[in-house]
Amino acid sequence: MKKFLENIPLVTLTLLCCVFLYTCNTNRNVNKVIKKNAELTLTIDSLKSDFQTRLEIEGYKISARTLYDNNAVVRTKERPDDIMHQYDVEIQKLSKKLK
């Protein structure tokens, strides 16, 4: 028992060192996770904007196809050919934005 009491400061110091090292390791891991999370957030935001642009492109393509398939002569100020040309111009703009 006396030998144990003599070594209490050494055991305490050893335990404190172990706890300190474990805490440092945990903080490093937390910092890695935070950094990865920031990178993933940027990636997701860029993918979201690309997806939105692709949806707009597909919407214009579908509208142009529908207008072409119907070959409708609509009683408006613009001819269907002019509207299809506008769709093509918008598709080209958005395609350049993706690249």
Image: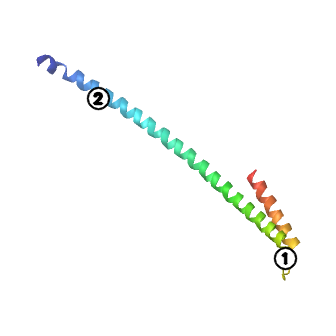
Residue 40 image position (x, y, % from top left): 57, 46
Residue sitting at x 42%, y 37%: 27
Q: Label 1 belongs to which residue?
A: 72
Residue sitting at x 52%, y 45%: 37
Residue 83 image position (x, y, % from top left): 84, 71
**Which three-letter amino acid code belongs to the residue tagged 1?**
Ala
Residue sitting at x 19%, y 19%: 7
Quarter-of-image position of residue 92: bottom right
Residue sitting at x 83%, y 63%: 89
Q: Nearer the viewer, mark 2 or mark 1?
A: 1
Residue reaching furthest to the top: 3
Quarter-of-image position of residue 72: bottom right
* Picture quarter with the N terminus: top left
Give the camera-side residue of 32 and 51: 51
Direction from residue 2 to residue 61 in the image, left or right: right
In the rendered structure, find residue 16 and report the number of the disc placed on it: 2
**Which three-letter amino acid code belongs to the residue tagged 2?**
Leu
Please rate how many residues cluster around mark 1, counting C-alpha atoms within 10 Å: few if below 14, some from 14 to 19, many from 20.
Answer: few
Residue 86 image position (x, y, % from top left): 83, 68
- SS category of the residue bearing label 1: loop
In the rendered structure, find residue 22 and report the number of the disc placed on it: none
Q: From mark 2 to mark 1, how far is it between C-alphas?
A: 82 Å
Residue reaching furthest to the left: 1
Direction from residue 61 to residue 52 in the image, left or right: left
Specify the color scheme.
rainbow
Residue reaching furthest to the bottom: 75
* Mark 2 or 1, nearer chain start: 2
- SS category of the residue bearing label 2: helix
| Relative height, residue 2 to residue 77 (above, below) | above
Give the camera-side residue of 20 and 69: 69
Give the camera-side residue of 6 and 98: 98
Direction from residue 41 to residue 73 in the image, left or right: right
